[in-house]
Amino acid sequence: MNNREFAAKALRMAEEEKTLYVNGCYAKRLTEAQKKYYIDHYSYNRGLIRKAKINAASNDTVGADCICFLKAIVDGWDPDVKDDACGVKYDPSHDLTEKGLLDACGKTVSADFSEIAVGEYLYNPGHGGVYIGDGLAVECTPSWKDGVQITAVHNIAKRSDCEGRKWEKHGKLPWIDYSREYVSASAPVLARGAVGEDVKKLQVLLNAEGESLDVDGSFGPATDAAVRAFQKEHRLETDGSVGPLTWSALLCG
């Protein structure tokens, strides 16, 4: 799995799935059997409020915690697979703590957020997430929306459209391919009227998808139409705005 695919799956879980923070849950559907298992086996889930939320969740809700949702994606999470585990094939070698995942990143671990790749692991003591570009993360937390959600990486910039936090470190997980070019943390969201080198990059990527745009660095009507067509084909919001979801889909190739 490459870094773009990893980030795109995290985004899909955050954007398209009903999710709930359930300690120990490996991004499984909360059937009655799964609810009983995770309440019986994890003391956090037996708290009165948490237990009530779990029992009230619909059976198509995805249960996860801050680390297990990431490990589930690495192990093949696919919501189109019609089983309780959403296609996850458990691999015990990936079943590490949040600090264990950071250690697995080896020499790529850094506290410098001026250069960070899409799909990198984000670490705080006791917590983890994944960077998805444009100063955003996907994390699973009982805070805010109480589940898998998009948040701001305050090391890069605070945002008015979502909650967020500062992270201590980031690194490249050994099971993810980071060799493809990625959009840097400072890459702008592009829309009609934009000009410059980032627009040229966008036009080249759209041409690789079958368009025949002039690579002139001007986000005009033709580029806007091509972006909207690409977004529609990839089941993205057809708004003509090239943000992290559209960049991720383009760069996955």
Image (cartoon, rainbow, N blue to C red):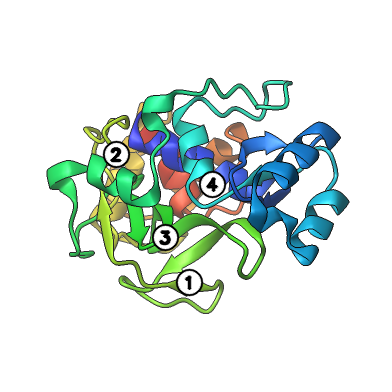
Mark 2 touches mark 4? (CB < 8 Å): no
Towards the viewer: 13 or 192: 13
Q: Earlier along the polypeptide chain: callout 4 or callout 1?
A: 4
* Crowdedness near tag 4: few (<14), some (14–19) or many (≥20) residues, C-alpha within 10 Å: many
Q: Is residue 212 visible?
A: no
The residue that label 3 is drawn on is 126
Tell me if label 1 and label 3 are in contact, CB under 8 Å: no
Q: Secondary structure at mark 1?
A: strand
**Which marked residue is nearer to the observer: mark 1 or mark 3?**
3
Disc 1: which residue: 164
* Tags 4 and 1 touching, CB below 8 Å: no
Does residue 248 appear to the left or right of 83 in the view shown?
left
CA–CA distance in space, label 3 to label 4 = 22 Å
**Which numbered circle lies on residue 231?**
none
Res. 110 visible in picture: yes
Instruction: Specify the quadrant of the image occupied by residue 174.
Output: top left
What residue lies at 75% left-to-right and 35% top-to-bottom? 34
Could you tell me which residue is drawn at 57 percent across and 50 percent down? Answer: 65
- Which is nearer the N-term, disc 3 or disc 4? 4
- With 61 as the anchor, is 111 left or right in this view? left
Task: Find the distance from the CA under tag 2 to the CA under tag 4.
Answer: 17 Å
Identify the amino acid type marked 2.
Leu
Structural distance between the alpha carbons of marks 2 and 3:
17 Å
List the residue tagged with mark 2.
173
Quadrant occupied by the N terminus: top left
According to the picture, the residue beneath numbered tag 4 turns out to be 11
Structural distance between the alpha carbons of marks 4 and 1:
16 Å
